């Protein structure tokens, strides 16, 4: 059996271990942590793993295809790369690495407003085929200009964020003095000195910055001023009126990320959204919330077929993707697995992670006798 990836790291768990060894502690803990006591972070993963699938060993099986139609495009797999903030802090140039890997593998890459590459750069890498996730500016003129840049760069899918009305309480980041750029305490300096390859790559690519936001930022902000700028510039709380305004402004496809219950799913449909991404922000916002798979199981009962239902949170393998699809999701997204990959293996990390997930998912499909992605629900063991 041959593997289209580095066989020394055949699982996401292997990449996570390597990433922890490769990047400073403050960067890894930002990537890896949830909020408060990490309860919801853990539930996202463990609840998915309770879902069981039924194989059909005596059925006629021709071949299994992962190709998936979504918003007028045929993707080569039913998963994409979720928006992640501060990507360049975890591994220099990682947003560009992952965008290129996604484009080459024909899966969607979602660019976050608050990551470390610009709208225009990612559009250039992906020939305009990336999606853009809007982190809500408080000023209408900033919103209008960002949307204009995204439209002019060729983005066709806009993702608006519902699940960050406040910043999550994250004890690790507080202890580490995490900011952009990171506050260089003695402890953080020692961490950087212990990761020379990360330090050299950072030197090569430059200190990470909010590239999309640079046109709106005063020059030479210190850390305190940067924090004040971010607080003044963004208003994270969505409401129906804000969504209506964005729906009127954006003529392409628009979806809401962060739906966690049936009430908000119904409102999203009524507001003319083209789809929803069920998400709890990777367990980073509400420790007392439910896991994404449980939210999906509740929402799918009422809204399957009424809108495109996608999901992220807790997915760490091809079998996990299969579990989500069997439970009714039409598409899946992941953030941490791809960041583990690029933090572990640099330029090769993006395509390596994609190939692991595709190989695992293909094996599951063939084992189940599942020929197409839409057939996964037939293999769900209902309890």
Image (cartoon, rainbow, N blue to C red):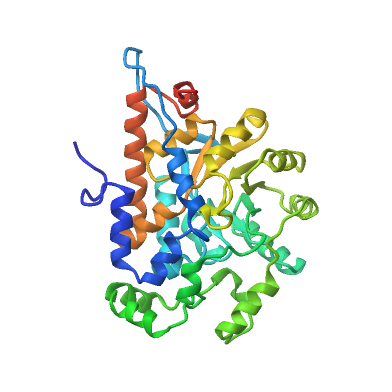
Is residue 116 among what the camera can see? Answer: no
Q: Return the x and y of residue 37 as percentages of the image width and height.
A: 49, 58
Q: Return the x and y of residue 301 as percentages of the image width and height.
A: 63, 28
At 40% from the left edge and 52% from the top edge, which residue is drawn? 337
The picture quadrant where one finds residue 2 is top left
Horizontal relation, residue 356 to residue 243: left or right: left
At 62% from the left edge and 44% from the top edge, which residue is drawn? 260
Q: Return the x and y of residue 35 as percentages of the image width and height.
A: 52, 60
Horizontal relation, residue 157 to residue 312: left or right: right
Is residue 304 among what the camera can see? Answer: yes
Q: Is 290 placed above or below 57 here? A: below
Question: Which residue appears farthest toward the left when viewing the image?
Answer: 1
Question: Which residue appears farthest toward the right when viewing the image?
Answer: 241
Q: Nearer the viewer, residue 134 or 312?
A: 312
The picture quadrant where one finds residue 355 is top left
Q: Is 37 placed above or below 297 here? A: below
**Number of callouts:** 0
Q: Return the x and y of residue 63 as percentages of the image width and height.
A: 35, 23
Q: Nearer the viewer, residue 344 or 252?
A: 344
At 35% from the left edge and 19% from the top edge, which residue is drawn? 62
Q: Is 346 placed above or below 194 here? A: above
Quadrant of the snapshot with the N terminus: top left
């Amino acid at each position: 059996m041959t593997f289209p990836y580095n066989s020394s790291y055949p699982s996401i768990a292997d990449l996570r271990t390597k990433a922890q060894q490769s990047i400073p502690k403050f960067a890894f803990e930002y990537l890896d942590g949830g909020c408060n006591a990490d309860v919801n972070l853990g539930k996202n993963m463990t609840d998915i793993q309770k879902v069981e699938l039924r194989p059909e060993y005596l059925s006629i099986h021709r071949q299994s295809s992962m190709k998936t139609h979504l918003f007028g495009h045929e993707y080569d797999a039913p998963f994409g790369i979720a928006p992640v903030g501060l990507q360049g802090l975890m591994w220099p140039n990682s947003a560009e690495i992952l965008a290129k890997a996604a484009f080459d593998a024909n899966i969607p890459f979602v660019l976050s407003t608050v990551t470390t590459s610009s709208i225009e750069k990612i559009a250039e890498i992906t020939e305009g085929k990336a999606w853009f996730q809007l982190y809500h500016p408080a000023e209408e003129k900033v919103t209008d200009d960002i949307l204009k840049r995204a439209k002019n760069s060729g983005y066709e899918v806009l993702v608006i964020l519902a699940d960050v009305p406040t910043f999550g309480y994250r004890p690790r980041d507080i202890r580490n003095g995490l900011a952009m750029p990171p506050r260089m305490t003695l402890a953080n300096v020692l961490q950087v000195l212990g990761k020379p390859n990360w330090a050299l790559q950072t030197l090569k690519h430059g200190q990470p910055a909010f590239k999309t936001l640079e046109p709106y930022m005063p020059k030479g902000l210190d850390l305190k001023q940067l924090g004040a700028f971010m607080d003044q510039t963004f208003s994270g709380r969505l409401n129906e009126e804000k969504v209506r305004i964005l729906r009127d402004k954006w003529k392409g496809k628009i979806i809401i990320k962060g739906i966690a219950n049936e009430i908000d799913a119904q409102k999203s449909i009524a507001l003319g959204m083209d789809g929803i991404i069920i998400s709890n922000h990777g367990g980073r916002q509400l420790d007392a919330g439910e896991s994404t798979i449980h939210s999906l199981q509740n929402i799918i009962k009422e809204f399957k077929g009424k809108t495109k239902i996608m999901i992220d949170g807790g997915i760490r393998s091809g079998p996990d993707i299969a579990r989500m699809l069997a439970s009714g999701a039409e598409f899946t997204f992941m953030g941490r697995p791809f960041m583990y990959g690029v933090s572990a293996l640099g330029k090769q990390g993006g395509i390596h992670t994609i190939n692991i997930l595709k190989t695992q998912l293909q094996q599951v499909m063939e084992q189940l006798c599942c020929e197409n992605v839409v057939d996964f629900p037939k293999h769900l063991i209902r309890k």
